[in-house]
Amino acid sequence: METLSSPFGIFQLQRVPVRNKETLRAWDAADEYLLHHVWELSLSSEHAGQVLVVNDSFGALTLALAPFKPVNWSNSWLAHEGLRHNARLNGTDISDIQCLPSTKSLDFSPSVVCMKLPHNTCLLEEQLQAIRKVVPAGTMLIAADMAKHIHTSTLELFEKHFGATSTSLAKKKARLIFSTVDKTLPEKSSNFPKIIEHNGMKLVNHAGVFSRQKLDIGTRFFLQHLPEAQQDASIIDLGCGNGALGVYIGQCNSQGRIHFVDESYMSVESAKESWLANGLDDRAQFTPNDGLTGFPENSVDIIVCNPPFHQGNAVGDHIAWQMFKQSHDVLKRGGELRIIGNRHLGYHVKLKRLFGNCQTVASNNKFVVLSARKK
């Protein structure tokens, strides 16, 4: 836990999921820079209910602006959970703060917009288009990120989809983007959701989904080596993305019960739409969640997973490690966890430590498919 000092107050903040000996902060210099700028705007009580906060990672921006009753709009279930966690930590009442998933449309007209840049240009375009539709003429959007992530192409997106754009000087390697809405810009139709096909299987991709333009090569390889499930099996597609793994299993197994889980709202919605697009029945569930948190122990026959190796800009294996530990708890005795990963990540070591066994199902020059069973 570390302390964020801002003009709006001092806050104790943690990343979620909470880890012992956490080495990463729950905010960055861009959050600090943005809060100082908003403070200088001298917001008043008249702005209550008119503030929109976009892509706030763990609640640093939203908690600081809590007196103005902001709407927190995000593609991340974990971001919303981080806000709730840090609100409890600081004793902050957030009952007047709306946590709005990215799959829901903005239903109010904000006069103040504070954004952390998503590291996905398709999602940024979607968000800029959606915000421009609802803000009053003349509204300025203030975006923030570390300077190394702000490129000329980033500013061009703001110019194209929102309005006249400029940047601040860099401070602590962070930079602000100022963009004033131009209501005369022609509305551009969204390219999402996008439907792609793979071997006759239809997959729906919303803008915030990994590998949204085409099916990634890891998933393509994994689809060739998925486990065969008994007809009455309970199966989880963990970190489901667009649902390719679970949909394929559902096509091969007419009775298996399949649960799609991801922390991205757009991923869960994509998986749901992929399931329906392939004419499958109502035996599936779709849940945005922090991995398998809250799932009952010893309840599932098979878990398939293509684990991510980053959370935002933070790269590491801590998310995969959490997924593996949760899978071990949730699987029935004899149940199987089957995963795919880049060869260099060494997931077999962790699986052997947890499960006491690990078998290589298939491999190529880049990926390895591994299987571990709960004893």
Image: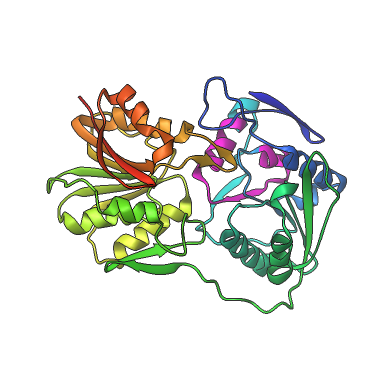
In which image quadrant can residue 130 be found? bottom right
Relative to 136, is 268 on the left or the right?
Answer: left
Relative to 209, is 218 on the left or the right?
Answer: left
Vertical relation: 345 (above or below) 112:
above
Residue 110 lies, in percent from the top left, at 70, 58
Residue 225 lies, in percent from the top left, at 24, 49
Residue under the point 82% across and 48% down: 43
In which image quadrant can residue 27 be found? top right
Vertical relation: 209 (above or below) 146:
below
In which image quadrant can residue 254 be found? bottom left
Residue 234 lies, in percent from the top left, at 21, 43
Vertical relation: 308 (above or below) 86:
below
Name the residue furthest front: 365
Q: Which residues are magenta?
A: 60-86
Q: Quadrant of the N terminus?
A: top right
Name the residue furthest top: 21
Most common SS among magenta residues? helix
Observer able to see residue 76 = yes
Observer able to see residue 107 = no
Q: Specify whether residue 304 is painted magenta.
A: no
Near-viewer residue (359 or 126): 359
Relative to 231, is 195 on the left or the right?
Answer: right
Near-viewer residue (114 or 358): 358
User: Colour scheme in the image?
Assistant: rainbow
Name the residue furthest left: 231
Q: Quadrant of the C terminus?
A: top left
Near-viewer residue (289 or 229): 229
Residue 341 lies, in percent from the top left, at 38, 42
Q: Specify whether residue 83 is painted magenta.
A: yes
